[in-house]
């Protein structure tokens, strides 16, 4: 029997509607979108349809979207591309202490290239104070990069406020929206950002495809050199099959967002209520500003991976790991100053469109039993 899947923040299964849309592009439509003949034109049309569907979800112009291989490439292009293209204006970047490695590792790299990076703290719920962003701005600040939704605890950041502050100083803003798209409304005009990262496999599209929103007028130094694909911004023959899938996933997300939000929130509340019978646990994240599908739970004095190894019937993610002489806690939990006895036992449960109440009830029963067994 397959374990109950509660790891939708890691990746989502491809929706049937998405797979069905992609199938013809495995066999029948195989042309190069850059070719001028019938085969090429059919695939070019499919690429632009996918771009239009994604633009409709995000509320932006199709010309402001380029396709990438996923969230990591989009983040790399946004940060490196903007930093190197605008180096003459300054060398200071602001980010947070809870970013995904696809941002934090890029920032570390840029520090070796002469850039200065300020890593902003978060409060105990994993949320940044916009006032801290304002205080960190310098005359030489050129870019602010803060994720919209944290992948571990689900906390949402005040991106609109940050963008408004940045605009006063002429500073560009990038946000990694990999975890937010398809779960909460992501309206680029409301967020006010200049660069935004999308990853297809986080909202029922295929893996290996993503996009980067680049506001009109923003200049980036190329990351990929070659022919003039994607408005001469990202060289390489377009991944037609997966762009088709990404577009269909975006269309689904736009149509289903209100219902998905209610569904996910209901299941998370159900799981939270069920686990609340346990002693010495705590729930992490911000209760007012959060993803609807994410529940981060810390079980005091229980090691997360040990708990999960005793839960073969549930698939979830650990936030910490015990080693021979140390405990490695995720950057997010460390930034939140979670007490070590709780941090070491942190597990993220994330639900999705295929999760059911029955699965949540079964999972809760198994989790409670495993916790009792380990404590005894």
Image (spheres, rainbow, N blue to C red):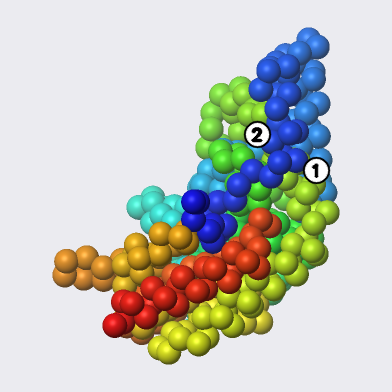
In the rendered image, the residue lying farthest to the bottom is: 279
Q: Position of residue 178 (x, y in %)?
A: 60, 55
Q: Quadrant of residue 290?
A: bottom right
**Residue 205 in picture, x, y percent from top left:** 65, 43
Residue drawn at point x = 50 percent, y = 74 percent: 365
| Res. 121 visible in picture | no
Q: At 71% from the left edge and 31% from the top edge, which residue is drawn?
A: 22
Residue 323 visible from this viewpoint: yes
Looking at the rendered structure, which numbered label has been put on residue 334? none
Quadrant in which residue 281 is drawn: bottom left
Secondary element type, mark 1: helix
Residue under circle 2? 242
- Determine crowd level at label 1: few under 14, some 14-19, many 20+ residues with C-alpha closer than 10 A: many
Q: Determine the residue located farthest toward the left in the rendered image.
A: 325
Residue under numbered circle 1: 53
Name the secondary structure under disc 2. helix
């Amino acid at each position: 029997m397959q374990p109950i899947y509660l790891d939708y923040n890691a990746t989502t299964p491809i929706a049937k509607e998405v797979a069905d849309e992609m199938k013809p592009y495995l066999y029948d439509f195989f042309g190069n979108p850059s070719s001028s003949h019938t085969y090429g034109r059919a695939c070019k049309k499919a690429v632009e349809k996918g771009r239009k569907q994604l633009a409709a979800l995000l509320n932006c112009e199709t010309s402001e979207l380029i396709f990438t291989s996923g969230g990591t490439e989009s983040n790399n292009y946004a940060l490196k591309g903007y930093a190197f293209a605008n180096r003459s204006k300054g060398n200071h970047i602001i980010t947070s202490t809870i970013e995904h490695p696809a941002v934090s590792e890029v920032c570390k790299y840029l520090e070796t290239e002469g850039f200065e990076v300020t890593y902003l703290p978060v409060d105990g719920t994993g949320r940044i104070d916009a006032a801290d962003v304002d205080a960190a701005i310098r005359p030489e600040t050129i870019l602010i990069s803060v994720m919209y939704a944290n992948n571990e605890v689900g906390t949402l950041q005040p991106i609109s406020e940050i963008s408004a502050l940045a605009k006063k100083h002429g500073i560009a803003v990038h946000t990694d929206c990999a975890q937010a798209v398809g779960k909460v409304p992501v309206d680029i005009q409301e967020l006010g950002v200049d660069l935004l990262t999308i990853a297809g496999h986080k909202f029922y599209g295929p893996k290996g495809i993503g996009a980067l929103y680049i506001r009109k007028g923003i200049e980036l130094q190329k990351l990929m050199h070659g022919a003039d694909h994607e408005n001469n911004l990202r060289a390489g023959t377009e991944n037609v099959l997966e762009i088709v899938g990404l577009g269909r996933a975006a269309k689904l997300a736009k149509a289903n967002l209100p219902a998905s939000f209610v569904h996910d929130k209901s299941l998370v509340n159900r799981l939270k209520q069920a686990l609340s019978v346990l002693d010495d646990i705590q729930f992490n994240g911000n209760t007012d500003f959060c993803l609807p599908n994410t529940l981060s739970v810390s079980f005091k004095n229980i090691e997360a991976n040990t708990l999960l190894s005793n839960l073969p019937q549930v698939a979830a993610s650990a936030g910490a790991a015990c080693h021979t002489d140390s405990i490695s806690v995720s950057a997010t939990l460390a930034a939140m100053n979670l007490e070590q006895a709780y941090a070491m036992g942190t597990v993220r449960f994330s639900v999705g469109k295929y999760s059911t109440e029955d699965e949540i009830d079964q999972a809760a029963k198994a989790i409670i039993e495993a916790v009792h067994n380990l404590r005894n």
